[in-house]
């Protein structure tokens, strides 16, 4: 099955709603308003086009990162269409929703600047902590033994291979 991939540039309409599924996976949702503008040369003014309001869903790590950082952003995601039967008088009618399931969210650098900070997973952070502890222990042992470890230093950090 092919997915429709799209880029939406718009304004976030409400705060991100972050919740957990029954399995404990984070899921974030928010609404984006996007419209077009064009310059009308005859009237020499900008003309607003139709505004589209879209629901956005983010899962797992993306959900957590979006909830912690989203303001006015650019959004890249997969279009999802769903149809729901709604009661109407004696019968019902179908309502079609167009949503976006985001796989990446980022700033529109044409509108401003960004300061990106990579989030480390718990296992990577734990591994780095262990490596630092091992290097510090090796340096302490070498210092106790009177070994010169200055040749093993680069950029102020001891080499882990020592």
Image (cartoon, rainbow, N blue to C red):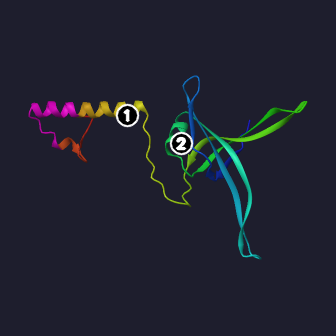
**Circle 2 — which element?**
helix
Residue found 54% across the figure and 58% down from its top: 109
Residue extent of the magenta highlight: 136-150
Residue 12, percent across and down?
Answer: 61, 49
Residue 48 horizontal side relative to residue 139, left or right: right
For the residues labelled 1 and 2, the Cα–Cα distance comes to 20 Å
Residue found 64% across the figure and 53% down from its top: 10
Q: Which one is in front, 49 or 160?
A: 49
Depth check, mark 1 against mark 2: the one in front is 2
Residue 47, percent across and down?
Answer: 73, 66
Q: Which one is in front, 55 or 7?
A: 55
Residue 126, percent across and down?
Answer: 36, 30
Is the residue under label 2 in contact with that under label 1 (CB below 8 Å)?
no
Give the residue pinned by disc 2.
66
Q: Which one is in front, 13 or 21?
A: 13
Looking at the image, the residue that sits furthest to the left is 146
Give the residue pinned by disc 1.
125
Residue 95 is one of the magenta-drawn residues: no
Residue found 84% across the figure and 35% down from its top: 94
Residue 119, percent across and down?
Answer: 44, 40
Magenta stretch, main secondary structure class: helix
**Circle 1 — which element?**
helix
4 over 94 or under it: above or below: below
């Amino acid at each position: 099955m092919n997915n429709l991939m799209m880029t939406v540039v718009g304004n976030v309409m409400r705060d991100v709603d972050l919740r957990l599924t029954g399995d404990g996976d984070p899921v974030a949702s928010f609404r984006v308003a996007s419209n077009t503008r064009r310059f009308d040369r005859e009237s020499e003014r900008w003309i607003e086009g139709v505004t589209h309001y879209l629901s956005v869903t983010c899962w797992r790590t993306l959900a957590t990162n979006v909830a912690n950082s989203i303001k006015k952003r650019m959004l890249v995601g997969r279009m999802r269409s769903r149809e729901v039967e709604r009661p109407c008088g004696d019968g019902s009618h179908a309502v079609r929703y167009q949503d976006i399931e985001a796989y990446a969210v980022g700033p529109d650098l044409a509108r401003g600047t960004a300061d990106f900070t990579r989030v480390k997973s718990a296992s990577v952070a734990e591994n780095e902590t262990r490596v630092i502890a091992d290097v510090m222990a090796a340096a302490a042992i070498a210092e106790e033994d009177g070994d010169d470890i200055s040749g093993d230093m680069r950029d102020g950090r001891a080499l882990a291979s020592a």
